[in-house]
Image: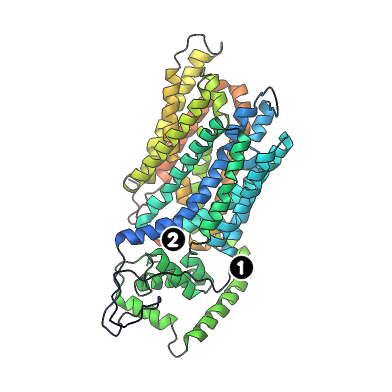
Amino acid sequence: MPTQTTEYRFQPPRSHLYGRGQPRCEGQCLNNDPTGRRAHNPSLFRSRLSQVLANVSSYLLILDLCIAYSFPTVIIAALMDAEEGIAVNHDEASWLGSIAYIFQPLGSVMSGTIVEFFGRKWSMIIVNLPFLVGWILYSVSNSLAMLYATNVIIGIGIGFMEAPIMTYIAETCQPDMRAVLTSIPSVVVQCSFFITYVMGMLTSWKTTAAINVSLPIITVIYVSQMPETPIWLLSRGRVKDAERSLCWLRGWVTPDVVKEEFSQLVKYNNSTKKGAMDNNAVIQLTVLNASEDTADLFDQENIDHSKPEADQTENNTAQANEEDSQESHCSLETWKEMLRRPTLRPLILVNTYFLVQSFGGMASIRPYMVHVFREYGMHDEAEWITVGAGVLGVIGSVTLVLTVHWLGKRLISLLCMTGNAVCCLLLGVYSYVVLYPDGVPEHQVTWMPLTLFILFFFFSSTMFHVPWMMLSEVFPFRTRGIATGFSAAVCYVFLFTTSKTYLDMESTMHLHGVFFFFSAVNFFAIVFVYFRLPRMEGKSLEEIEAYFSGQNKKGFLKK
């Protein structure tokens, strides 16, 4: 559990000037030193670099999460109808590919509580434990029951990770960086799929699991060196720690450089706790041109110059203990916030997006890709096509990173959903005309379904991370951890349902019926996104909160 004395060391920027014989400042520089010189703002590269380095911790968690998420694809391909060792039939394969999903909601719901109690940083350390245990058990599994048990542990671990990852990204980056930093995980996700498929081709699945044991260990070491988010520290009354954290995240600067932004954070934290945010004013997390009057007001309201700093520190600690006590008695009230408009509206938006994405095709067939390719007549190339799907996933996620800031999540979603709907429709037509009812013909034009699958993989991977990006920005701070965990839990219920039922759907509806169903879901998704998803790029978290609460819709044009 984090202590109250956590500190984040930083060096003053190189552009800071010192007089001859003047000692170097240790992070408490004044606006005006005896020589009349002031610390300069860091370079744009430096301020960006610190935010990227901090969020690499989240990306490492995502790498471990998604390798575990895609690992059943490798296991099922190796064990389905195997002639020796562990072998699974269709029914057992459906459980192996989906059982983790039904336990992920348990971890997701708990993750919301964990991230609020322990904080974002320590939660990101704790959640690595189930993965460490899971990868070790995978590497020594010798029975189907043991694989099921390991999948349960991994599933809970995946659920644990959702809330810490998304809240940390949202609370450490500036608004103009948020679109890029929240889209980079899509590249990490698809790279992890590619890595998993390649390792499954080059080594046995047990060896792959043994190699993956190193991932949670590396992640814990890295995360331990990163700062906690400033807004969480403020919510616990740890003002000095919050200021140090913000200095770290804005380029290892001195407190006077982030004074204006920090004052806005304090005001937002106070308004959140009082539940009395001004309906007509939007408080910016990052204010680059805040007035000097605001900064002076912060000094007057939050600093008692008649008391020594030691007394102020004691007061902060006492305040933190009192607030922690209050938080423990307000958990029911926090859950009630989920039913209020600022949280309920984005909750409906995100979970409906998860619903249509889960039943839109890719999530259903991912554990059974090798099987599906063989059903379409691509027997010898099926495993290599799976690796190619990983490459296309990386290309699609890079496309998202490069275009999301300009096109926006809304337009990207509409384009990709249209592409998915058309591809699934044509795959259904091909299956009905060529494959049904006689099965795969002796002479088949396999380039046609292969081309459609290539386009389908590209569009699906491009939009795959969009709802996860929304998790990091649509919820208000007070319910962000719990709402994120709850949404992730709902998502995994959908994933369990679609993965567990795919083989049954295929046997009942045949391939063409399944892909016609996927096409219909995507056409519905197009209508939903068109009417319900606004453009949020470049907006602060407070502006987005005000939009969903109905206070301010200016600038959220659906274009």
Local crowd size for mark 2, using a 10 Å CA cut-off: few (<14), some (14–19), many (≥20):
many
Residue shown at the point (42%, 18%) measured from the top left: 447
Where is residue 2 drawn, in percent x and y? 58, 67
Residue 540 found in image quarter: bottom left
Residue shown at the point (54%, 82%) measured from the top left: 314
Residue shown at the point (34%, 67%) measured from the top left: 287
What numbered label is drawn on residue 330?
1
Q: State the separation of the CA atoms marked 2 and 1.
A: 26 Å
Residue 492 or 64: which is nearer the viewer?
A: 64
Where is residue 203 drawn, in percent x and y? 57, 33
Residue 117 found in image quarter: bottom right
Residue sticking out furthest to the front: 21
What residue does disc 2 label? 172
Residue sticking out furthest to the bottom: 306
- Residue 516 relative to residue 41: left or right: right
Local crowd size for mark 1, using a 10 Å CA cut-off: few (<14), some (14–19), many (≥20):
few
